[in-house]
């Protein structure tokens, strides 16, 4: 994990779900993030390949780190993923997120999930920065 404690690193430090899966934040900068996850036996489905939900979660976590790198609390407004090739137990995956654009309180981000140099999935996320009223808990 990176040692600089910017907004993305602080958010990730509180992300119990991602950390429980062994996801590591390797780098985060303005509108970018690089995360890593090793596929474990508990992540494999009945076909012997990684369950798509785990790959989505890795990509979504990279997206969250990238869109929260600017500071204000930012959440997903929507996302979709294309699975390119199967992933198996023991595969080490890297998810690289990059900001395409921000406009008003919205943003658009791409995340490529790779096994080595081979792309295994492509994720596109749409973000929304919350205002102070939306951030208040009930």
Image (cartoon, rainbow, N blue to C red):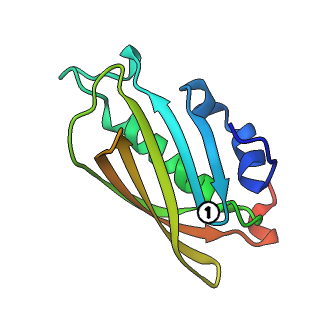
Q: Nearer the viewer, residue 108 or 130?
A: 108
Placement of 45 over or under 81, stated as above or below: above
- Mark 1 lies on a secondary structure that is helix
Q: Could you say where residue 23 lies in the image, as x and y percent from the top left?
A: 56, 32
- The image shows a total of numbered marks equal to 1
Q: Could you say where residue 101 lies in the image, as x and y percent from the top left?
A: 53, 78
Give the residue displayed 73% in from the left and 62% down from the top.
73
Residue 80 visible, this orientation? yes
Looking at the image, which residue sits at the far top? 41
Placement of 88 over or under 120, stated as above or below: above
Looking at the image, which residue sits at the far left? 47
Specify the quadrant that holds the C terminus. bottom right
Looking at the image, which residue sits at the far bottom? 104
Q: Which residue is mark 1?
A: 67
Residue 138 visible, this orientation? no
Give the residue displayed 65% in from the left and 53% down from the top.
28
Q: Nearer the viewer, residue 138 or 18?
A: 18
Specify the quadrant that holds the N terminus. top right
Give the residue displayed 58% in from the left and 53% down from the top.
33
Label 1 crowding class (10 Å Cα cut-off): few <14, some 14-19, many 20+?
Answer: many
Dividing the picture into quadrants, the one containing residue 114 is top left
Dividing the picture into quadrants, the one containing residue 72 is bottom right
Give the residue displayed 78% in from the left and 41% down from the top.
3
Q: Could you say where residue 133 lies in the image, as x and y percent from the top left?
A: 80, 70
Placement of 14 over or under 69, stated as above or below: above
Classify residue 80 as left or right of residue 8.
left
Q: Could you say where residue 109 lies in the image, as x and y percent from the top left?
A: 48, 66
């Amino acid at each position: 994990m990176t040692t600089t404690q910017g907004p993305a690193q602080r958010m990730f430090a509180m992300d119990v779900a991602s950390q429980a899966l062994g996801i590591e934040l390797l780098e985060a900068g303005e509108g970018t993030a690089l995360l890593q996850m090793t596929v474990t036996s508990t992540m494999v489905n009945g076909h012997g390949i990684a369950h798509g939900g785990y790959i989505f979660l890795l990509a979504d976590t990279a997206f969250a780190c990238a869109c929260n790198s600017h500071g204000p609390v930012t959440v997903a407004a929507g996302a979709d993923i294309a699975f390119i090739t199967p992933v198996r137990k023991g595969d080490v995956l890297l998810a690289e997120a990059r900001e395409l654009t921000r406009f008003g309180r919205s943003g658009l981000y791409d995340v490529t999930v790779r096994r080595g140099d081979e792309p295994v999935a492509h994720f596109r996320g749409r973000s929304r920065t919350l205002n102070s009223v939306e951030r208040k808990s009930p």
